[in-house]
Image: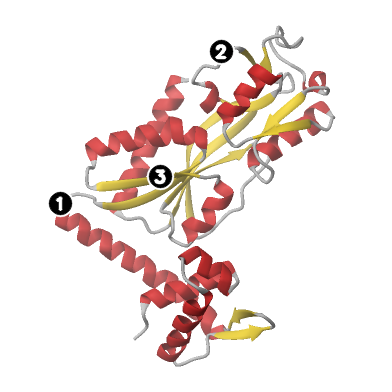
């Protein structure tokens, strides 16, 4: 009889690539992971791992077991959720969600508040994180839903094992100091900002890539990126106090940003889609959270 807990270890090793990576993700020591996987090999009656230098890789039998493990773990998750819902008389259970900052504030927080009233049996745990780090956690069942974003011209990778649903499409606008010479114009040409100091999210994020691409493609210059933060409110403050420029989406600008000028780009709109990612198999509790996120996104879009 195969032990599902050990199947989780094998799946984590497959995803992380090393014993140390799997151990760190799960809070085990590498030796404990190795011992448990040795037991799993005896249970399976087949060699699942082979050494390649100082690392290990899955054999064909190990790869096959990982594929089946995903199905088994999906079934276990669905069974646990159904039993919890029957016992409670309504959707129940823990749903773990990640979201980037502006979506956390404008979409996820209102959804969590609404769920506390409509589905008290659903416990929502929310973490602020960028989509780049959240998708692996979703696929490994460390998260149940991810609120991510995609800027125009920068498509995210397609994951066939995940379900993606649009939540809201919004505009990205130039944010300038009120004293900037271009702040008085109705629309601003990117080329006129070639000498500006810029603020953007951290390297490796979609927002930073979008800002660099906009400066290069629309303004034909390399931006002087001096300020980096994944907190858009910090970037707004750097515009207000340090004279920076930034390209920021409506979700953060919808709060109202006194002390700065918000303008469209003369070259045409830049937009961003905020989307929801879940695994293909969704429990009633995850369905309830997804519905609440859609409602909150619709209300946010209507208020802009």
Disc marking residue 47:
none
Mark 1 near mark 3, Cβ–Cβ under 8 Å? no
**Residue 274 image point, x, y percent:** 52, 37
Depth check: 240 or 155 in front?
Answer: 240
Q: Is residue 217 above or below residue 97?
A: above
Q: Is residue 109 left or right of residue 41?
A: left
Q: Residue at x 38, y 69 (%)?
A: 73
Disc marking residue 126:
3
Which residue lies under the disc numbered 2?
Answer: 258
Q: Quadrant of the N terminus?
A: bottom left
Q: Is residue 153 left or right of residue 169?
A: right
* Badge nearest the viewer, 1 or 2: 2
Q: Is residue 25 above or below residue 213?
A: below
Mark 1 near mark 2, Cβ–Cβ under 8 Å? no
Q: Residues within 10 Å of mark 2 (few under 14, many from 20)?
A: few
**Gap in Å between the C-alphas at discs 1 and 3?**
24 Å
Residue 230 at least partly seen: yes
Q: In what element is the residue under mark 3?
A: strand
Q: Residue at x 42, y 57 (%)?
A: 280
Which residue lies under the disc numbered 1?
Answer: 89
**Residue 24 image point, x, y percent:** 52, 65
**Residue 135 image point, x, y percent:** 53, 54
The residue lying furthest to the top in this view is 184
**Gap in Å between the C-alphas at discs 1 and 2?**
48 Å
Q: In what element is the residue under mark 2?
A: loop
First of labels 3, 2 by sequence position: 3
């Amino acid at each position: 009889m195969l032990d599902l807990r050990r199947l989780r270890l094998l799946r984590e090793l497959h995803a992380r690539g090393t014993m140390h990576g799997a151990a760190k993700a799960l809070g085990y020591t590498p030796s404990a992971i190795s011992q448990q996987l040795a037991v799993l090999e005896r249970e399976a009656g087949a060699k699942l791992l082979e050494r390649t230098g100082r690392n290990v890789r899955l054999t064909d039998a190990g790869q096959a077991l990982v594929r089946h493990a995903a199905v088994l773990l999906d079934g276990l998750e669905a069974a646990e959720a159904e039993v919890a819902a029957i016992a409670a008389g309504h959707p129940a259970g823990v749903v773990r969600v990640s979201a980037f900052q502006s979506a956390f504030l404008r979409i996820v927080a209102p959804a969590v508040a609404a769920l506390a009233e409509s589905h008290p049996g659903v416990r929502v745990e929310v973490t602020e994180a960028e989509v780049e780090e959240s998708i692996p956690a979703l696929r490994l069942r460390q998260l149940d839903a991810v609120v991510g974003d995609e800027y125009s011209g920068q498509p995210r990778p397609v994951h066939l094992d995940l379900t993606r649903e649009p939540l809201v499409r919004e505009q990205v606008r130039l944010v300038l100091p009120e004293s900037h010479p271009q702040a008085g114009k109705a629309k601003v040409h990117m080329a006129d900002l070639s000498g500006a100091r810029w603020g953007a999210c951290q390297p490796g994020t979609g927002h930073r890539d979008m800002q660099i691409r906009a400066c290069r493609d629309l303004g034909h210059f390399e931006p002087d990126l001096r300020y980096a933060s994944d907190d858009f409110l910090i970037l707004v403050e750097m515009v207000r106090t340090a004279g920076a420029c930034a390209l920021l989406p409506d979700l953060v600008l919808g709060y109202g940003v006194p002390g700065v000028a918000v303008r469209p780009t003369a070259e045409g709109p830049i937009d961003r889609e905020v989307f929801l990612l879940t695994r293909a198999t969704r429990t009633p509790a995850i369905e309830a959270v997804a519905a609440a996120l859609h409602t909150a996104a619709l209300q946010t879009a209507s208020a802009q």
